[in-house]
Image: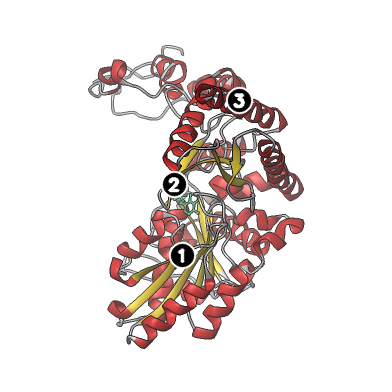
Amino acid sequence: MSNDWPPSDDPACLEIPPSEMRAMAAGVVERVVQHIASLGHHPALGETSIDDIRAELRAAAPRSAQSLEGVLAPFFDDWVHRSFGTAHPGYLAFIPGGGLFSAALADFISAATNRYTGVQVAAPALVELEATALDWLREWMGFPAEARGWFTTGGSLANFSAIVAAREKLLGEHLRDGVMYASSQVHHCVTKSAQLAGILPDRVRTIGVDESFAMDVEALSVAIDADTAAGLRPFLVVSSAGTTNTGAVDPLVEIGALCRQRSLWHHVDGAYGAFFHMVPELRPLLAGLSDADSVTLDPHKGLFLPYGTGALLVRDGEDLRSAHAATAGYLPPPGDAETYDPSQYGPELSRPFRGLRVWLTVQMYGVERLRAAIAEKRTLTLDIAARLEQIDGLVIDAAPALSLFPFHLHAPGWTPDDDDGATRALVDRVNARGRVMITGCTTAGCYYARICVLSFRTRQEQVDHAVDDIRNAARELLAAVR
Ligand SMILES: *Cc1c(COP(=O)(O)O)cnc(C)c1O
């Protein structure tokens, strides 16, 4: 950097001269590109201890300007690597996404141009881009033209907003009598959102699952009848289009039919799985999703964007609008139902221009490439599952419904506790090898290892690494007890 920034003679001046902006941005781009290009040279699960640098991280705010290069050096050389390798090609843990560079460009553009997309009139062309991006999602989910939604921070807020819309439409002032239903495998943010939306825990029913971890519709129907008979008001079923634990897809067609018959709202939490519906040949795996009253999507999972972009679509846009519409004397009047006005469809006013991430990504790749990438993740998952099935001692607990499945290690004579201990040890060994990262989950008292392929960076090479590393770990653990 040259010497004219920051200006020494005018401390209140914060504007950066164009030549300096170019130099700073070029420096950042160089750091970022180097970082991405070398992701594979780092372990998929980084060292996450920060005891030795805590003081450095907690430093007091500097009184005067620091050099950008100076402050970024430890960030890129050290701090960022002390983490789960969420952007690593071998990241098969939790629900991956990867973080497409196109979205980083979009964020840079939207932060640098800093237009106000909370209300339609403040930047109508940009809000229209956001509406267009939402409309693409709507089309991919098979929702009707009257559907509306909003780009949220993630699946959690999308589920929250859906529960609020269902509550407003079906309960009104009878809030305390309202009962909602979800399976034992539902994401914890759904029960948390229910609480935030005023549906207390004693009005949230947990429905059991079958051997593939999908909701038991018969048990759902019995529970709804029991609550109705008790004078309560069943109003909402939340089903999962891909659970986080094991990837199970609830029977959406049957649940939808039951909801229609009993006049309940059917919300589908597709935070993990909804984008598989974008691929025509995979749509049958999510049959019934298009008929739901609302659906949660997480572009930061299934569309490979970086964290911070979820989406909600509500079949009848008016249901979402009437639950969130509001205005004030200092605001311009909201647009009519034809004009998309983000603040009328969600709880936010000032907000980041999240839609640009989706819009620019689709522009830069085109729909066909994105579909090909999503479809490939399922093909890779089927490949891993088929190969793990051949390994001595490995049990696949449910076939992949989409691109996620659970498995565990078992040897003759082992108790369930032995299985759990060995499966945990297997996960640790695989992660210690550093080429891939996997995680497990505990449900109904059992521990399962799980693999989820959803990062755009995960290709055949990482699948081969995963299979080899799991095979070796299983072999070592079985040899130790024989
Ligand atoms: C990830 C996930 C969520 C929560 O979404 P966030 O984007 O983390 O807020 C909800 N439901 C399912 C099924 C998920 O996988």
Residue tagged 3: 469
Q: How far apart are marks 2 and 3 (CA)?
A: 23 Å
Residue type at mark 2 is Cys
Position in image of residue 22 (x %, y %)? 54, 23
Q: In this view, does 421 lie above or below 319?
A: above
Q: Judge the density around disc 1: few (<14), some (14-19), many (≥20) Cα neighbours within 10 Å.
A: some
Q: Do the residues labelled 2 and 3 touch (CB within 8 Å)?
A: no
Residue 475 visible in the displayed image: yes
Residue tagged 2: 446
Residue type at mark 1 is Gly
Near-viewer residue (112 or 426): 426
Element type at mark 1: loop
Near-viewer residue (193 or 123): 193
> Which numbered disc, 1 or 3, marks the residue that appears first in the sequence?
1
Which residue: 47% across, 27% down? Answer: 428
Q: Judge the density around disc 3: few (<14), some (14-19), many (≥20) Cα neighbours within 10 Å.
A: many
Position in image of residue 19 (x %, y %)? 52, 21
Q: How far apart are marks 2 and 1 (CA)?
A: 15 Å
Residue tagged 1: 208
Position in image of residue 217 (x %, y %)? 53, 72
Q: How far apart are marks 1 and 3 (CA)?
A: 34 Å
